[in-house]
Amino acid sequence: MDDKRVLLYKAILRVQEKLYRLSKIHLERFNLSDAEYGIINNLGDNALTLSELSQRMLRVNSNTTAMIDRLEARGLARREPDPDDRRVIRVRLTEAGKKLRDEVVPKQNRFLQELLAALTDFEASALIALLEKVEKKCLDDHYYNSKR
């Protein structure tokens, strides 16, 4: 029989996959992928560099570049030079991108709230704390490096 932690890992993967799939279906109504939604949500009213966006979304720059290309082609985002450093390119939402963000972010938040409504506020807070504890352990370089 599997250890409780192995069962927990499998349960987290199952729930993550289901949440991702349902979220993806919901975002398709707005003609957005999950990653494009992440960019629109993270940009807000700010202009960010590709590196800043990639870091916030936990993605590599090349993937972010391709997503920005798609959003730019749709007129939702634009690249612009940094006013202080011409070597740096920033990404900003266009007016159409802001309008879409203002429509989709609240609807996506309500959708996620409905998906997770089975949890009480206390349970949601406890689960967040527990998952953050696991995340911290996963990110602990000393632990990772010592187990190689």
Image: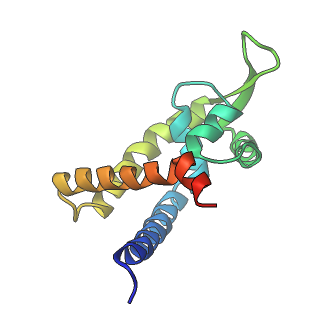
Image spot of residue 76 (x, y percent): 64, 38
Residue 130 location, quadrant? bottom left
In the image, residue 24 above or below residue 124: below
Q: Is residue 32 visible?
A: no
Near-viewer residue (76 or 111): 111
Quarter holding the N terminus is bottom left
Image spot of residue 9 (x, y percent): 43, 71
Near-viewer residue (7 or 124): 7
In the image, residue 82 above or below residue 37: above
**Identity of the residue drawn at 61% across and 52% down:** 145
**Identity of the residue drawn at 38% across and 80% down:** 3
Near-viewer residue (102 or 23): 23
Image spot of residue 137 (x, y percent): 45, 52
Left or right for 17, reference 68: left
Left or right for 54, reference 142: right
Mark count: 0
Quarter holding the C terminus is bottom right
Q: Is residue 146 visible?
A: yes
In the image, residue 84 above or below residue 111: above
Residue 68 location, quadrant? top right
Structure colour scheme:
rainbow
**Identity of the residue drawn at 29% across and 56% down:** 127
